[in-house]
Image (cartoon, grey):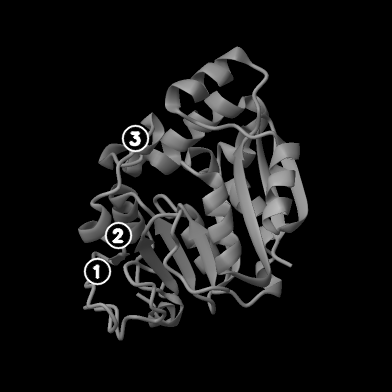
Amino acid sequence: MDPAVLPILVCPRCRTAAPFAHLRHPRCHACGLEPTERSGVLDLIDVAIGGEPTASSTEQRLMESDLVARVYERLWRPTFVRLLAGKGAGAAVGGISGELFIHKHSLSLDDRPGPWLDLSCGPGAFVRALAAAAPGALVVGLDISRAMLDVAAQRTSGYSNAVLVRADAHALPFVDGAFGGVNNAGALHAYDDPELVFREIRRVLRPGGIYVGSTFAEAPSLVGRLAARAAGIRRFDTSELRAWLQRIGFADYEDVRLGDAFVFRVRRP
């Protein structure tokens, strides 16, 4: 695990910056919190204060499944995307390789020094791609699901610049302006409070930093609408999302539609 992550962390309990001297046995020098580091994952969920997070939707509960985590990249995600986004999403989103190309290009990896945050990283497909594309930069993968992070730890073990963190997207455990870019693929629709996540993303981006996300658009088909409702998934109108992000303080909104899904890009001024 790359120790370059230490200066950008904050303690999830007392919010002290750079709270840990090392990663193998982390302990906050301000409040004494001792998060766990196991199997290549730094767990920054403070269970003593709030307990274990509780899934509030069907999709969130499924993301905690060991079986779903193992088959997520090759089977679960492609099937799920085609059901909710239709054939128009095709290989660009249903097949992760096409979406990886779009996200990496949108993040402008070659023009920015990083570090990079892959928010709601799941089993680590984008973490691996970003770490390989920017070998000299720190890449942090964050998720709240233990099952997903266990799989991600196995699959990213060969990338020395990748760090995996367990935390809540609504309360990111990083200092202000920590990242040059935030990648957020296929998770926005599942957050309990997207606005809070947007504000946290803006906070941890440095000025000029890029936020790239992908999610589901409003679906014209009855099947798509019913499937989303059954899973507790939020769909977004692109014009409303643009206005929402601009109100929070992002600029230069762009998006590309892929069936009933889309990838968007904004910048922190």
3 vs 1, front mark: 1
The residue indicated by pointer 2 is: 45
Residue 165 place in picture, x, y as percent: 37, 63
Distance between the alpha carbons at the discs numbered 3 and 1: 25 Å
The residue at the point 54 percent across, 45 percent down is 194
Residue in view at x 57 percent, y 57 percent = 199
Up-down: is 124 above or below 133? Answer: above
Q: Earlier in the sequence, mark 3 or mark 2?
A: 2
Residue contact between numbered discs 1 and 2, judged by CB atoms under 8 Å: yes
The three-letter code of the residue at mark 1 reads Pro
Q: Which mark is residue 62?
A: 3
Disc 2 marks a residue whose amino acid type is: Ile
- In this view of the protein, which residue sits in the foreground, 245 or 211? 245
Q: Earlier in the sequence, mark 3 or mark 1?
A: 1
Q: Position of residue 80 (x, y in %)?
A: 48, 30
- Quote the CA–CA distance across marks 1 and 2: 8 Å
Label 1 CA crowd tier, 10 Å (few <14, some 14–19, many 20+): many
Q: Secondary structure at mark 2?
A: loop
Looking at the image, is 207 positioned above or below residue 50?
below
Q: Which residue is mark 1?
A: 35
